[in-house]
């Protein structure tokens, strides 16, 4: 959570008083953002609730004003807004809102705002959850969801999160029990939305909508609901969508409940190491893992190596192109793959492995238990210096059927060894050598090998 500064601030305000109490054993760290904000509001009610006769009624009025603000994209409130909602300045109100002096040309006036927009959104969601007619829940949520400018995005996550008993429990001490019919209405709406996003094969699902439904599932902490809706999902594609560490934590939760996940495409999602930390515990469940262009770095490969070492690892394809990898990560990768029996495709294109990194990979390829069938090493900084090691390793490898070595710095010095590899490695079905530094004569020597075996593809 603390990768978001506002959540980090709320965390301190929420849990600081909570964990300074003597009976710490009964306290549980919040698992969701909704639970976190519930503790925040709980502390305000506990600190200031005795100052007024009915804290619930005043909170609902504040929440109604907050909801109007979210609806109208309004974050600054004036005395007229307080009067309209039957509110007046008080110490209780100051627990929720901050007074600011606003200066204009003629005078000064006091305006009010919530300490952060997310607090306004939470209070708005809480008030609507407590007051909405259970029969109108679907209409309320659907109308909020239909706003395409995202103004209700966080509001909806909070609203769904309040259906969780762990989110409601601390607040019920001051606000009374949360209606069962409202909770059921929220669960039915979420079920409909998740199934709609996942099951609609007739159009390109907006990936942001799909991600938001996963946030709903996470905030609800309803494992039965999650298993019913995503338990049989085989493919998840969120490529090109920027994922924060919190998004990755949510996605990890969802994948953890998927019993049949096979294909996970997270290419170009700006995941980096911090996001991969959240995803690490569930990656071994996927068969095809596309993580290209995420700036994972060498430290990210260490996390992936742990997934590859998992005795239950199902990963068959590990696409890692353009991830700022260097030769330093190769040792970890090779060590993990020595015991891995599932991986058949390894894409390391456009990383800075260099000759030293590929020499380490060559040691892996010599292992008779190596199952890799396709190895992609385009644009990884290879020169003639690594050719002998690579060819020697592949000459004893019985599983490799495809090898991509394009966009490197091989010259005619490597042609004899590459010709020998192609002629003797009968399992090899294709090899790509485009955009290297071969002369015209060197290219002809390599291209002529296409005729040496039926179906053999040689790209030069």
Image: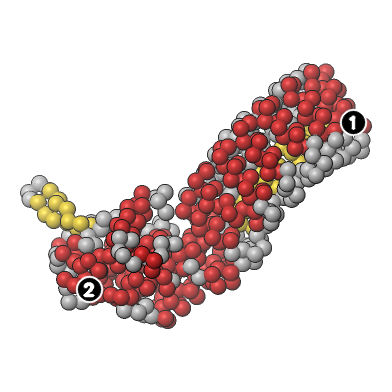
Above or below, 265 relative to 70: above
Badge 1, how many Cα within 10 Å: few under 14, some, many 20+?
Answer: some
Is the C terminus in the top left, top right, bottom left or bottom right quadrant? top right
Between discs 1 and 2, the one toward the N terminus: 2
Above or below, 391 relative to 101: above
Residue 122 placement (x, y as % from top left) = 34, 64
Mark 1 — residue?
423
Above or below, 137 relative to 450: below
Residue 50, image quadrant: bottom left
Query: Which residue is nearer to you in this view: 85 or 284?
Result: 284
Query: Which residue is nearer to you in this view: 70 or 26?
Result: 26
Residue at 66% in and 52% down: 310
Residue at 16% in and 64% down: 91
Mark 2 — residue?
55
Above or below, 415 relative to 134: above
Query: Which of labels 1 and 2 is toward the front?
Result: 2
């Amino acid at each position: 959570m603390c990768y978001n500064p506002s959540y980090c601030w709320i965390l301190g305000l929420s849990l600081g008083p909570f964990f300074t109490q003597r009976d710490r054993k009964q306290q549980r760290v919040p698992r969701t953002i909704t639970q976190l904000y519930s503790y925040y509001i709980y502390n305000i009610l506990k600190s200031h609730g005795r100052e007024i006769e009915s804290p619930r009624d005043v909170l609902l009025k504040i929440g109604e004003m907050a909801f109007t603000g979210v609806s109208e994209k309004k974050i600054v409130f004036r005395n007229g807004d307080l009067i309209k909602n039957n509110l007046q300045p008080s110490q209780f109100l100051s627990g929720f809102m901050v007074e600011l002096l606003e200066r204009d040309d003629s005078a000064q006036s006091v305006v009010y705002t919530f300490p952060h927009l997310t607090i306004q959104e939470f209070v708005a969601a809480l008030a609507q959850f407590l007051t909405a007619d259970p029969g109108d829940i679907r209409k309320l949520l659907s109308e909020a969801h239909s706003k395409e400018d995202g103004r209700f995005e966080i509001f909806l996550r909070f609203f769904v999160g309040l259906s969780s008993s762990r989110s409601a429990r601390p607040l019920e001490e001051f606000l009374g029990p949360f209606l069962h019919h409202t909770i059921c209405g929220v669960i039915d709406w979420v079920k409909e939305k998740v199934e709609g996003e996942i099951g609609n094969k007739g159009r390109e699902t907006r990936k942001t909508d799909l991600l938001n439904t996963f946030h709903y599932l996470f905030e609800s902490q309803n494992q039965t609901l999650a298993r019913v809706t995503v338990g049989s999902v085989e493919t998840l594609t969120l490529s090109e969508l920027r994922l924060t560490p919190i998004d990755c934590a949510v996605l990890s939760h969802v994948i953890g409940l998927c019993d049949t996940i096979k294909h996970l495409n997270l290419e170009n999602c700006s995941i980096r190491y911090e996001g991969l930390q959240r995803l690490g515990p569930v990656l071994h469940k996927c068969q095809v893992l596309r993580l290209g262009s995420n700036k994972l770095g060498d430290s990210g490969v260490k996390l992936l190596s742990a997934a590859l070492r998992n005795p239950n690892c199902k990963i068959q394809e590990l696409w890692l192109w353009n991830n700022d990898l260097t030769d330093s990560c190769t040792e970890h990768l090779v060590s993990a793959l020595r015991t891995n029996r599932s991986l058949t495709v390894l894409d390391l294109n456009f990383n800075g492995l260099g000759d030293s990194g590929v020499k380490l990979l060559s040691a892996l390829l010599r292992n008779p238990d190596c199952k890799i069938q396709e190895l992609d090493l385009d644009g990884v900084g290879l020169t003639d210096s690594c050719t002998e090691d690579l060819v020697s390793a592949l000459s004893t490898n019985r599983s490799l059927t495809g090898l991509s070595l394009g966009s490197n710095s091989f010259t005619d010095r490597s042609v004899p060894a590459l010709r020998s590899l192609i002629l003797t490695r009968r399992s090899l079905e294709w090899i790509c050598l485009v955009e290297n530094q071969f002369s015209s004569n060197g290219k002809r020597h390599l291209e002529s090998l296409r005729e040496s075996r039926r179906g053999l593809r040689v790209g030069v």
